[in-house]
Image (tube, rainbow, N blue to C red):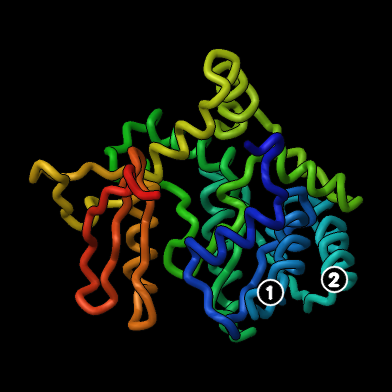
Amino acid sequence: MRSHPPALITIVNRTLRDECGVARGDRLLVAVSGGADSSALLHALSRVAPRLGLELRAHGVDHGLRPEASAELDRAEELATRLGVPFGRTRLRVPAGGNLQARARAARYSALRRAAAEAGARWIATAHHADDRAETVLLRLMRGAPPVGLAVLPARSGDLLRPLIRARRADVLAHLGRHEIRWAEDPSNRDRRFLRCRVREELMPLLESMSPGIVGHLCALADELGAGPGPAILDEKGELLRLSGAQRRALRRALSVAGAAKRTRVRLSGGRELLIDPKTRLPELLSTANDT
């Protein structure tokens, strides 16, 4: 039994390999701000990229909303330079007004996609982690989103990758401390005029005091709703086998990599597993309870 959670580098490596669908030779544009999350992401990716055969570029966006942003990106550039990652930045002007965070976010992603195209990057990696995902599920619930609207921030969506999405905020901070990485604190992240900040600063601590595993529960809900029905598999009684979201994702990964070389197995609970035949690419339910 593990006495401590896996290190952030291990989490990032596993998420990229198992959930993001990256291939050797892919180029990633890493969105950076100089803050804690993106600094940890850039550092962890710099360690993982050589193992997976990936190329990195870092890019920051200054929205023109805070005078400190330029200096924060200078810090991000210093880190990228130290890690040997090419760095670029875009300066925007997002005028003040209603729904400022949403407009700034839209402008940021447009700028990142332009930068990715110019750099020849297939993917844009952002620093969302599990706590961000749990907050987003709650925000969607508060706004009355249907179930499909709660399947937020998966590890991969379109051209966006989220290598930290299986990590907690505590994992990020531990990584920064372990590697003595300095970062900048954006005061807008604690500005309670914004609903997300109130969820982060008020609602999440209250929920965690009543249910310490609430972040994991909310992320599992997003996984379950985003996994889809998956292939229909019958159990020993001929009834539909119910798989969790994690099991459906594992089955899809196995189906995607199953080839002529060997059969692929997906372990289930209760001493059972699914065997994917490389020729038919169909899963077969096996019982291993009596295997020796």
Q: CA distance from mark 1 to mark 2?
A: 15 Å
Of residue 290 and residue 44, the one placed in the foreground of this image is 290
Give residue 4's quadrant in the image: top right
Residue 198: horizontal and vertical position, in percent? 59, 26
Of residue 186 and residue 7, the one placed in the foreground of this image is 7
**Which quadrant of the figure contains the N terminus?**
top right
* Residue 149 seen in the figure: no
Residue 169 position (above or below residue 117): above
Residue 147: horizontal and vertical position, in percent? 28, 39
Q: Amino acid at mark 2?
A: Leu
The residue at the far left in this view is 238
Q: Which residue is mark 2?
A: 83
Q: Residue at x 63, y 53 (%)?
A: 11
Residue 272: horizontal and vertical position, in percent? 31, 46
Q: Residue at x 38, y 81 (%)?
A: 261
Residue 51 bears which disc, if any?
Answer: 1
Of residue 23 and residue 281, the one placed in the foreground of this image is 281
The residue at the far front in this view is 292
Q: Amino acid at mark 1?
A: Arg
Q: Residue at x 54, y 13 (%)?
A: 210
* Residue 93 seen in the figure: yes
Marked residue nearer the N-terminal end (1 or 2) = 1
